[in-house]
Each structure stands twice: as C-alpha cells, then as structure tokens.
Image (cartoon, helix red, strand yellow):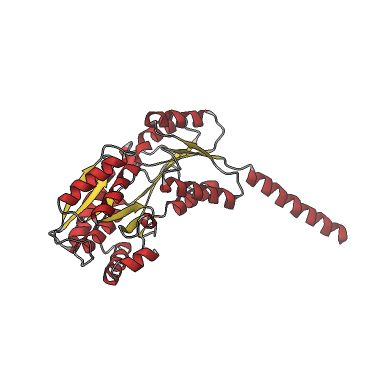
Amino acid sequence: MKSKIIITFIGVFLGVTIFTLVGFAGPSTAILIPGTIGDNPLFQEDIKGAKEAAEIAGLKEPKVVEGGDDYASYEKKLISLAATNQYDILVTFTDSMADSIVKVANMFPEQKFILVYGDIHLATEEIPPNLFSSKFRSEDQGYLAGYFAGLVTKSNLPNANEELKIGIMMPDIYPAWNDILIPAYEHGAKAVDPNIEVIQSVLGSWVDVSKGAQAAKMQFAQGVDIILLLTGSACMGAVDEAKVEGKYIIGFNTNIIHLEPDVILGCVLINNREEVKNILLRAYKNTLPFGTEEVVGAKEGVVSFTFDDPNYKQRVPEEIQIAMLECYKRLQNGEINPLGD
C-alpha cells in the first residue's frame, strides 16, 4: 500500500511539474504599438492588460515594440516580427493598422495575428484564417458623448451659454469617425434637443498642440461651449484654451478629468485593458476564433462613462448624472439606436 501511495504521489508531482513547465514555455506574444506608449494612456492600458494575461496564464511577459512617429515603418516592423518566427501571437491596434495586418497575415499564414480596436473591414471583407479582430462600437461612444454634451449645453452650469452649439475635434479623418462616431454624437445631442448644432474641427496633426488650441478658440468664438476631443495629443491643446475661455471639454477613451477637473466634465470610456486581457487569455487557451471579428460596446460593459469619478460626481449637476445613467442603461438594453431610427 505504501509503495502505491508513493508512486501515485510522484506521478501527480511530475504531472504538475510538467504542466507548469509547458505552461511557462507556452505561447509567446509580441505587441507592436502604432505610436509610443509614454504619451498615450490607451496604449498604457493595453500593455497592462497584456501583462495581466501573461501572468494569469503563467507565461513570459509579451515583447513590446514601439512604432514611434514614423508611420511608414509600422508595417515593416510587423513584417520583421513575423519573420523572426519567435512569436506565436502578434498583436497590434487601431484602424491605421488594418491594411498592414491583413497584408502581413497573408504573407505569414502560419503566424497568428490579433488586431484590437481596429475595423478590419476597412481592409478586407474576408478575414484571413490566422487573424482575429476586435473593435469597439464607436457609435455607442459617440452617442453617450453627444447626449452628455447636449445636457451640458442646455444646462445652467456657469460656463454653458445660451447658444445650442457643441463641438467635436479630431486629429485626422477616419472612416469610423466620419461615418459612425460623428453621426452618433450628433444623434445623441439631438435626442436632448433637436436644435443643437455640431461644429467639427480636423487638425491634420496628431502631435501639434497649438493646432488644438487654435481650433478650440475658433469653435468657442462660434458659440460652442463644450467640445469632445478624440484621441491624439494635438487635441489636448483645446484643454488649455477651454481653461482660458471658461468652456468645457469631454475626454475620449480614457479618464482625463484629473488633468483639469473644472474644465473636463466627463469622459466616454473604453475598457481596453480588460478586452486585451480577455482576448489574449482566450488565445492562450486556444479558444479564440481566428478568422472572425468581435464587436463590443455598451452592452458588454466595454464602452462606458466616468460615472464614478469623484470630480464628475461633485461638479456635474445631479439631474445630468441621473439622465446619463438612464441613457446608458437604455443603450445597454438595446432600446436606443445610436445612429438613428
């Protein structure tokens, strides 16, 4: 009996040891950032999610490669990573990488690729079998931001004026913004008051802060009292101008209220950290359906708003907070079509 027990114990011990070693030597991942991490909170959260997934799975941390400011080099960097044959999974982000990741996925059919918060259908109708794509419902983001902007411009807040004008600012032109997010932003605002007018600014730069300040100044001169800033450090120039002129800002993707709590009243959020973590954990378990696209938004809790931010709760009137929560619940339940009836 004793010998059987010892043999059984040794067998279990060896099994656990082998499983652990196999787990540690399991799938390896490399991440290509289309930009730099340091000045982009979104990319910072992406990396945190990827590291958390690796830790949970018992794997080495992913290798992270920054593309920097040389946009033309991103595709070459992705090709170089695939050509090394050192990584089981290559991950990158945003619509800007859609064409490149499809091209490189076709070049390296044995390599697994993941595109997060990028619309793969900008590049192809047929997704390569070694590519998985996940994107956020930008219409949910747009509608929430527009509804909030409408409530603010109609409110008695000290810096809200009598003109029913709200703004939106973007660093460049993207189909997903022009065709989906902006119409949803306008629809959300007009759900508050159909007379609200939306004024747009395209900066033509991702990094020139002075362009953001200048565009904000022009919008404020036209009667705008609150602007939604889409991603890109150039747009942040609008925050300083809003502070000078006593106007309001809505943040996008991440919570930036703490930067100027009297100016940035709220932010529409995406939980990209959790999404990246969940995608990679499924990939590590071989349950991620490569060759398909996943679309997530308010219904899944991935798109949200800064409902719990202490500055938001302190500075935004309670009736607006209540209205925003009701709007969000209706969006989650499918009672609202962000792009109209």
Which residue appears at 39% of the width and 57% of the height?
258
The answer to which of 301 and 309 lies nearer the viewer is: 309
The answer to which of 321 and 285 lies nearer the viewer is: 321
Q: Which percent across, then down, holds residue 339?
A: 22, 54
* For residue 88, side relative to residue 305 (left or right): right
In the image, residue 44 above or below residue 90: below
Which quadrant is home to the C terminus? bottom left
Q: Is residue 282 visible?
A: no
Q: For residue 40, which quarter of the picture? A: top left
* For residue 173, side relative to residue 37 (left or right): left
Which residue appears at 26% of the width and 52% of the height?
244
Which residue appears at 49% of the width and 28% of the height?
80
Q: Which percent across, then down, holds residue 204?
A: 26, 37
Which residue appears at 23% of the width and 65% of the height?
157
Residue extending farthest to the right is 2
Residue extending farthest to the left is 195
* For residue 48, side relative to residue 263 (left or right): right
The answer to which of 51 and 162 lies nearer the viewer is: 162
Q: For residue 8, which quarter of the picture? A: bottom right
Q: Which percent across, then down, holds residue 227?
A: 25, 53
